[in-house]
Image (cartoon, helix red, strand yellow):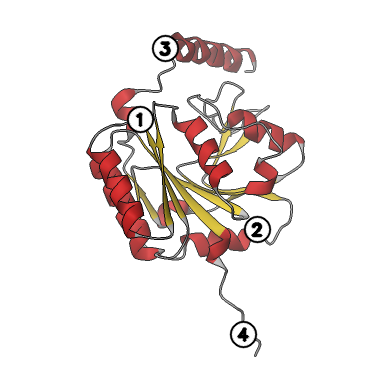
Amino acid sequence: MKTIPPPDLSAITIIIVNYKTYALTKACVASVLQHYPEVPLILLDNGSADESTRYIVETAQAHPHVVAQLNAHNRYHGPAMDQGINLSKTPYAFTLDSDCEIMRTGLLEGLLAIFDDPQCYAAGELQYMDRFGYTLPVGMKYYTRYIHPYAMLLDRAKYLTLKPFVHHGSPCLHNMQAAQRQGYHFYAFPVAEYVLHHTQGTCSRYGYGLGITTSVQKVMSKCLRYMRR
């Protein structure tokens, strides 16, 4: 019987963005180090200037495979993820929200196996978004396939040819719209079986920092759905 070699997890860099969520970030990083102690890890701090910043620096000092990137101000989640992807050197990037904990191994292994398809761009929790970044009900037309970045694996080389993640309530939206136009594939993966998502991170505490833009887009999204009924 032919032996199947284990997946090369050194092909993945894990990227975690922190903004003033010390307890959550600490639990998230601890879960990564427990289950994937040798996978490259980039920790980005968005100008927190608090105990979470100190924790990130100390973690990088204690682990040679961990890199700390300290930003002078809050670049917000999308641009910080883009920064991490550009800093990484591996073929694949795994974005993990700071309010998540990896509960067991099998997550990265399962996601990486999907990329046997050379046209695969991203894998994780698959959603369907309208053009403003709001999740669509089942059956709606004119959608964008959207892999939620709370626990997402993507092809770094493909990413760098597309629009970057931006400051937005759905920061990957324009990037994934561009990927869809290129004909790249998106795959659903049961990340919830491996990742505990507390949904109590930066957004729930500090908002998106988008001001009136969010309210306007929400109204436009509702109007668009009504027109398509």
Q: Secondary structure at mark 2?
A: loop
Q: Earlier in the sequence, mark 3 or mark 2?
A: 2
Q: Which mark is residue 115?
A: 2
Residue 137 location, x and y as percent? Answer: 54, 30
Q: Is residue 164 left or right of residue 169?
A: right
Residue 37 location, x and y as percent? Answer: 39, 65
For mark 4, what is the residue? 3
For mark 3, what is the residue? 211
Q: Secondary structure at mark 4?
A: loop
Q: Earlier in the sequence, mark 1 or mark 4?
A: 4
Q: Earlier in the sequence, mark 1 or mark 2?
A: 1
Q: Mark 1 belongs to which amino acid?
A: Gly
In the depicted structure, whether residue 161 falls above or below residue 108 = above
Q: CA distance from mark 1 to mark 2?
A: 34 Å
Q: Mark 4 belongs to which amino acid?
A: Thr
Residue 6 location, x and y as percent? Answer: 56, 75
How many neighbours does mark 1 have within 10 angstroms: few (below 14), some (14-19), or many (20 or more)? Answer: some
Q: Earlier in the sequence, mark 3 or mark 1?
A: 1
Tell which tag, 1 or 4, sits nearer the viewer.
1
Q: CA distance from mark 3 to mark 2?
A: 38 Å
Q: Secondary structure at mark 3?
A: loop
